[in-house]
Amino acid sequence: MPHAIRVHETGGPDVLTWEEVETPTPGEGEILIRHTAIGLNFIDTYFRSGLYPAPSSPFSPGNEGAGVVEAVGTGVTEFSVGDRVAYVGPIGSYAELRTLPAASAVPIPDDIDDQTAAAIMLKGLTAQYLLRQTYKVQAGDTILFHAASGGVGLIACQWAKSLGARVIGTVGSAEKAELAKAHGCDETILYREEDFVERVKELTDGKGANVAYDAVGKDTFPGSLHCLKPLGMWVSFGQSSGPLPDFNLGLLAQNGSLFATRPSLFNYIAERDRLLEMAKELFDVVVSGTVKIRVDQTYPLRDAAQAHADLEGRKTTGSTVFTV
């Protein structure tokens, strides 16, 4: 029988258990995938901890993966048994086998390996919508990217640099600063040692950044607002340090008539045509070498608890992939 990581009650990494499960059967419009690689993301810890409600209980975490089609349900014409595919969403990727809607999957180009594909579907598509849709980065823009050495950060900073932006990234250590500089950052700020608001002001001659991309949450609020130039945009797309407090929208006016948004990848990829367009642009920048993907950690899927502990303990850089 196949195995999967299951969560019976939310909590710390220790609630992730390795169990035998029944072999799933694809329904209408679905495909059955045998995973070869599975991506780890901070959102997985939100579901595991209960910060985000899971659709059912018990459940398997995980939102992205890559593998081979083992069976197709009725009505599926785009994929065949043996095809290599990658996907992001719905939840449930921490499994050797899984079914998912065929509309969620995309073909993997021949020149992208499975681990890379599993590492970039959520993080890379997130970088795509952040830079190309939520705030369309232009040459000459100055951007602030928090957690620049993380999985999304390393992709987004390279991509933004290729678009002609000046990239300022916050990081937690000198080692992570070097990593971020090697992946597109013009300047880095050690947020544990420096006041990142003051440093952004210094680096921009008091003008501020056009946009601040913030997946940190509580620890960088309201500082991110103070880093922006008038009419700048604050993009809050995660909360690795904890949820944001409620705040008065008057803060946006006080800091220069700012724009603020809380986007979600799953809204951007809800329509298949857009998903395919976004995935094509992502694959193109990876294949061309414009964006280089770092898979810095791999863990056997059965060791998901250790991987979650390392991720939350800020012990990881770049992307992390489970092997199956």
Image: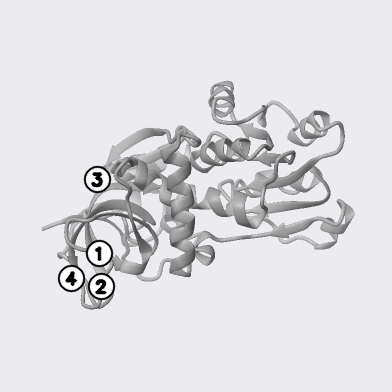
x then y, percent, for residue 54: 41, 66
Task: Say what secondary structure mark 2 lies in.
Answer: loop
Choose mark 3 or mark 1, whichever is in front: 1
Which of the two labelled residues, at mark 1 and mark 4, occupies the earlier sequence position? 4
Q: What residue type is disc 1 on?
A: Phe
Helix, strand or loop at label 4? It is loop
Question: Which three-letter amino acid code belongs to the residue tagged 3?
Answer: Arg
Distance of mark 1 from mark 2, alpha carbons? 7 Å
Mark 3 closeness class: few <14, some 14–19, many ≥20 residues within 10 Å = many
Question: Can you identify the residue that label 2 sits on?
Answer: 76
Q: Which badge, 3 or 1, comes first in the chain's sequence?
A: 1
Q: Which residue is mark 3?
A: 302
Question: What element does badge 3 sit on?
Answer: helix
Left or right: where 231 falls relative to 244 = right
Q: Position of residue 314 (x, y in %)?
A: 50, 35
Number of labelled discs?
Answer: 4
Query: Which numbered circle lies on residue 25?
Result: 4
Q: CA distance from mark 3 to mark 1?
A: 29 Å
Residue 79 circle label: 1
Residue 162 lies in what quarter of the image?
top right
Q: Amino acid at mark 2?
A: Val
Quadrant of the image containing the C terminus: top left
Gap in angstroms between the C-alphas marked 2 and 4: 14 Å
Give the label, 2 or 4, closer to the camera: 2
The residue lying at 47 percent from left, 33 percent from top is 317
On screen, residue 219 versus residue 113, left or right, reads right
